[in-house]
Amino acid sequence: MPGTIDDFIDYFTGDGPFDDDEVEQYSECFVSNKDKKDPDFNYDTYHQSVKESLRKLPEFQQAASYAVSLLAPADRQKVLGALGDAKVANAAKKIGLGSTDPSQMSAYDAARLMNYARTEWPNVLTNIIEEKPPFLKVLVGPVVVGALRITAKRLSTAPQGLGSTRLIPQSLPIPKIAKTVRRHSKSSET
């Protein structure tokens, strides 16, 4: 169970690795706080951090291609369909996709479309990432960890009432796709 905002900041400004369950729980603390009942777990800060994490993730298209190749046709339709038919048709012309039908797209074209969405429609892709569909875990995990690290950095230097006022180092690298986000539990060490 997640602790205080200071626990969050301490955890995500550290070197990791990060436990999947804790990543999920802290992410949920922010996503479920859209109504702003908890001033510490600021949804707007997290939402902006997801966008920034998406922009900074260097291996996005490669990870998207891999993630899409694992999707069942119905799941591919959900993800790419969430981008909107008009936007997909417009993007298909601009980047030369073989099809505008998500069920007909190759994994390569679907990844190119998602990469295009990342730069041209960041809000749409951010919303998809925040929903954390289980079938996109290979793509969502690194984005969410990156977003939580960016959020922790922002909140660590925020004015009173917007998170802790402690100062921490300003450079926090975004984890690479190939790195794991799983940490060995204490019980496995004994």
Image: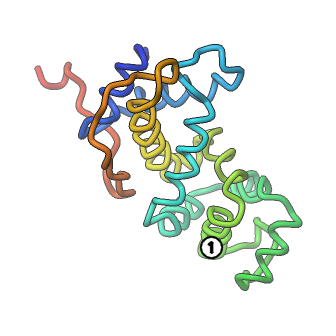
- Kindly identify the residue that appears in the image at 65 percent across and 14 percent down: 37
**Residue type at tag 1:** Arg
Relative to 141, does residue 58 appear above or below in the rendering?
Answer: below
Quadrant in the picture for residue 98: bottom right
State the residue position of label 1: 112
The percent coordinates of residue 83 (x first, y second) are 77, 58
**Nearest to the observer: residue 39 or residue 174:** 39
Q: Residue at x 44, y 37 (%)?
A: 154
Number of labels in the image equals 1
Decide if residue 120 is in sight here: yes
Position of residue 135 measured from the top left corner of the image (x, y, whole percent): 59, 47
Quarter of the image for the N terminus: give it.
top left
Secondary structure type for disc 1 = helix
- Can you name the residue that lies furthest to the right here? 86
The correct choice, above or below, for 43 with respect to 57 in the image is: above
Q: Check disc 1: other Cα within 10 Å, few if <14, some if 14-19, many if 20+.
A: many
In this view, 157 is above or below 94: above
**Res 12 quadrant in image:** top left
Q: Is residue 84 left or right of residue 40?
A: right
Of residue 139 and residue 87, the one placed in the foreground of this image is: 87
Q: Residue furthest front?
A: 159
Colour mode of the rendering:
rainbow
Where residue 131 sits in the image (x, y, percent)?
65, 38
Residue at 53 percent of width and 55 percent of height: 54
Residue in front for this viewpoint, 61 or 74: 61
Q: Who's the residue at 76% across and 72% down the image?
A: 104
- Residue 75 shows in this picture: no
| Quadrant of the snapshot with the C terminus | top left
Which percent across, then down, holds residue 6? 36, 19
